[in-house]
Image (spheres, grey):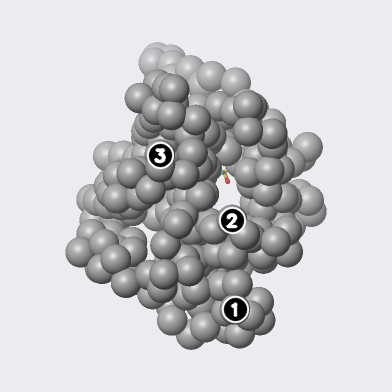
Amino acid sequence: MKTAIVTGATSGIGKATVRALVGAGWQVIATGRRADRLKALADELGAHVHAAVFDIRDAAAARGAIDALPDTFRGVDLLVNNAGLALGTAPAQSADLDHWRTMIDTNVTALVTITRTLLPTLVERRGAIINMASVAGTYPYAGGNVYGGTKAFVQQFTLGLRSDLHGTGVRVSAIDPGMVETEFTVIRTGGNQNASDTLYEGAHPMTAEDIASTVLWIATLPSHLNVNRLEIMPVSQSFAGFQVAREDSK
Ligand code: 8X3
């Protein structure tokens, strides 16, 4: 039985990914901060889930949780770097610096930390890494500033890992989802459920399960194939043009 670790497994894409992997016969280490939610997931899915409760931004806690894994979960074959968030949509010139730091700490620093921690095992087992990036890493939009920057980092880090891991057999992929209806927008807006509902209403956004099935597809491809990057959006979402600021006409 193969073993995966999924970060940010208490909700949304992470939780759906744990369910999809377990459904396909994997055992999964589900990580997150909220113990009650992880426990509920472990209760639902049984002994194939190990709940590892820690804040991904706390490097010592993450290391401690990895070191304390039960023997049967030690051989990690797949790391799904899903934990991440957006905070705020304010323009850069009025954005909250604490929001920026939290996004960088979570989406960048924590991701590289847990990746570095697990790389020796992944190399030993010719495993795989799937990083959750975003279309926001490729296409800028107003208010996306640091969130988009962190996701551009994830995209490029993925390609850099591919290069460094050349010849090891380790596969590395980034998924760039567009609009997915999860707690993402509630968190981004500081708890504004109404803003979230308004954004997704009538738009037929993707679901967490849509992305989880994409993770599973990548994870179960034949071992000679590597998806470098997979961009996926709902049909209802596309691109707008450049904007032009004009001098006031006199
Ligand atoms: C978020 C993607 O399109 O909702 O990662 O900004 S989008």
- Pinpoint residue 196: horizontal percent, then vertical percent: 60, 61
User: Which residue is located at x 35 percent, y 43 percent?
Assistant: 119
Residue type, numbered disc 2: Lys
Residue contact between numbered discs 3 and 1, judged by CB atoms under 8 Å: no
Please give the label number shown on residue 2: 2
- Pinpoint residue 238: horizontal percent, then vertical percent: 69, 31
Quadrant of the image where one finds ligand 1: top right
For residue 218, above or below residue 3: above
Helix, strand, or loop for circle 2?
loop
Q: Which residue is mark 1?
A: 47
Instruction: Quadrant for residue 183, please give it.
Output: bottom right
Query: For disc 1, does the CB lie below 8 Å from ligand 1?
Result: no
Q: Which residue is mark 3?
A: 123
Q: Is residue 193 visible?
A: no
* CA distance for labels 2 and 3: 15 Å
User: Which residue is located at x 41 percent, y 73 percent?
Assistant: 70
For residue 220, above or below residue 63: above
- Pinpoint residue 151: horizontal percent, then vertical percent: 43, 38
